[in-house]
Amino acid sequence: MTAIKVISFGYLHNTPPAAHITLDLRTHFRDPHISPDLRHMTADDTPVQAAVLTTPGITDLIDATARAAAAYAAGPRAETVVVAAGCAGGRHRAPTMARAVAELLTAAGHTATATHRDLHRPVVAR
């Protein structure tokens, strides 16, 4: 079975990683960064996860992304399928999304992992 790697990143830190599917979460989904209570938290914190996952449309996008990644994995090539999810700083929306997609794929029987390029970086002043 083809492996699927889901990478989260922040557009403000560097260019997006090479991927089969790239998602830009910057403008369409609620940004926890705007909340002073959530700004210095990350996707490792339950309040951030709740804020992201209750944003209208996000669960539909998670489901659609998992389906698209599975379709790539079902193709004739055996290379790892890469999905990249990006937000501004890479600390809130993108890593929450990456984990949710990887968990959904794993639950469906795929070999999926989530990695976070920029989760460890400091809060971006903006």
Image (cartoon, rainbow, N blue to C red):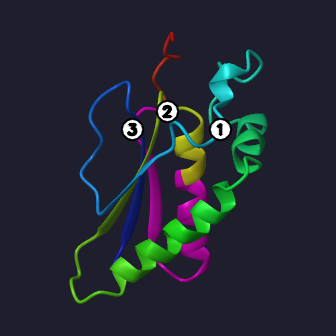
The Cα–Cα distance between marks 1 and 2, rounded to whole angstroms, is 9 Å
Mark 2 and mark 1 in contact (Cβ < 8 Å)? Answer: yes
In the picture, residue 103 is in which quadrant? bottom right
For the residue marked with disc 3, what is the amino acid?
A: Arg
Q: Residue at x 23, y 89 (%)?
A: 76
For the residue marked with disc 2, what is the amino acid?
A: Leu
Determine whether the residue tagged by mark 2 lies in a helix, strand or loop.
Answer: loop
Q: Which mark is residue 44?
A: 1
Number of labelled discs?
A: 3
In the picture, residue 69 is in which quadrant? bottom left
Return the disc, 3 or 1, that comes first in the chain's sequence: 1
In-image side of 97 versus 72 (left or right): right
The Cα–Cα distance between marks 2 and 3, rounded to whole angstroms, is 6 Å
Q: Which mark is residue 90?
A: none
Q: Is residue 80 above or below residue 43?
A: below
In the picture, residue 22 is in which quadrant? bottom left
Determine whether the residue tagged by mark 1 lies in a helix, strand or loop.
Answer: loop
Q: Which residue is mark 2?
A: 119
Q: Which residue is mark 3?
A: 117
**Which residues are drawn in magenta?**
98-119
In-image side of 36 versus 69 (left or right): right
Q: 3 or 48: nearer the eye?
A: 48
Q: Is residue 55 above or below residue 57?
A: above
Counting from the top left corner in percent of width and height, residue 44 is at 65, 38
- 18 magenta-colored: no
Q: Residue at x 68, y 60 (%)?
A: 59
Question: Most extreme residue toward the top, as rendered?
Answer: 125
The Cα–Cα distance between marks 3 and 1, rounded to whole angstroms, is 14 Å
